[in-house]
Amino acid sequence: MTQDRTRLNLSAGVASALVAVTLVALKLWALGETQALSVAASLADSAMDLMVSLGALAAIWYAARPADDDHAFGHSAAEDLAALGQSLFIMMSAGIITWAALARLWSGEPAPIQHHTQGIAVMVVSIVLTLALVMWQRRVAGRTGSAVVKADSLHYLGDLVPNIGAILSLWAANLFGMEQIDSVVAIGAALLLVVGAARIFKTAWDGLMDHAADPDLVAGIEAIARSHPGVHGFHDLKTRRSGSITFVNMHIELDGSQSLDNAHAIGASLRRAILHTYPDTDVMIHKDPVGVTPHPDDPSRADAI
């Protein structure tokens, strides 16, 4: 089951990277043919997709690898480091596109847009490939529950906006001679790139700074622990996210008079329940006797829940 899940996730990651490479190549050619800044903005967006897709593919591959002696918690932090660099590169690209678009608008000279039909055809192909990829990713995510595949799918859905904008820009320039709209569309697409890059930056930064996991995930884990048979309470629930993996540490309170075997079975059962609901987690559970008085030399902890 785990191998099938990994295989499906990898197929979605490989498909995402291949589509991104294809779109970058097509849009590079379209940019050379049309010289349209709206196409340049869409190209920058596809380049971002390629980097994000490669990061997602690496995350899936790393998630399938066991921890080793030098990386006891795995290698998932590399995804966050790469994402920081990607987001900064994307912001720089958006700034260059915006500056070029503003320069064209201020100069008052018409944009030298050529070969409109070829550019529109490339954008249409881009939309078709993107929709096909999203459909496959949604199918994989529905079967595996992979957060990485889900996030990549949402990202590609957002890419439809600059592609459609580029089509409208080329169409208006071809039929009505409205070359200025190309610069306006390029600026709008660049702003969308900045927004997307800022989100990637924040997510990566939070991961590197050991920010707590999503509140909904924390609340879900609390609900599982609260209702689990044999668990009388829990405390010191700590979470952090690194790449695509969420690390969970918690203390549970058990009947101190039961055997060690029974206590272990309850803890192991709770861990399986959490992993079943949230498969992209790494769970560590410490067992305390219910009602135990903390030693004065122990670090302070939150009140038992």
Image (cartoon, rainbow, N blue to C red):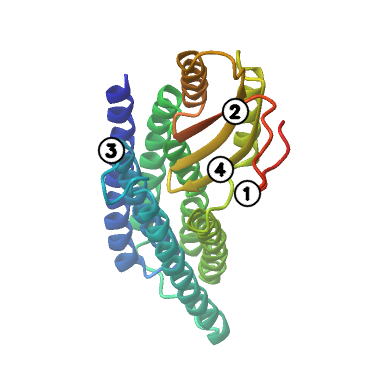
Q: Nearer the viewer, mark 2 or mark 3?
A: 2
Label 4 to label 2: alpha-carbon separation = 15 Å
Q: Which residue is mark 3?
A: 66
Q: Which residue is mark 1?
A: 297
Q: Secondary structure at mark 1?
A: loop
Q: Secondary structure at mark 4?
A: strand
Indicate the amino acid at tag 1: Asp
Label 2 Cα neighbours within 10 Å, binned few <14 / some 14-19 / many ≥20: many
Quarter that holds the C terminus: top right
Q: Earlier in the sequence, mark 4 or mark 3?
A: 3
The answer to whether the residue labelled 4 contacts the one labelled 2, judged by CB atoms less than 8 Å apart, is no
Q: Position of residue 191 (x, y in %)?
A: 57, 64
Indicate the amino acid at tag 3: Pro
Quarter that holds the N terminus: top left
Q: Earlier in the sequence, mark 3 or mark 1?
A: 3
Q: Above or below — where is 74 with respect to 226? A: below
Q: Which residue is mark 2?
A: 252
Label 4 Cα neighbours within 10 Å, binned few <14 / some 14-19 / many ≥20: many
Q: Earlier in the sequence, mark 1 or mark 4?
A: 4
Q: Secondary structure at mark 2?
A: strand
Q: Furthest residue to the bottom? A: 107
Label 1 to label 2: alpha-carbon separation = 20 Å
- The residue shown at (31%, 56%) is 24
Please name whichever residue, 253 or 162, is drawn nearer the observer in this view of the structure.
253
Indicate the amino acid at tag 2: Ile
Q: Which residue is mark 4?
A: 239
Residue 30: quadrant of the picture: bottom left
Q: Position of residue 294 (x, y in %)?
A: 66, 38
Q: Position of residue 256 (x, y in %)?
A: 60, 20
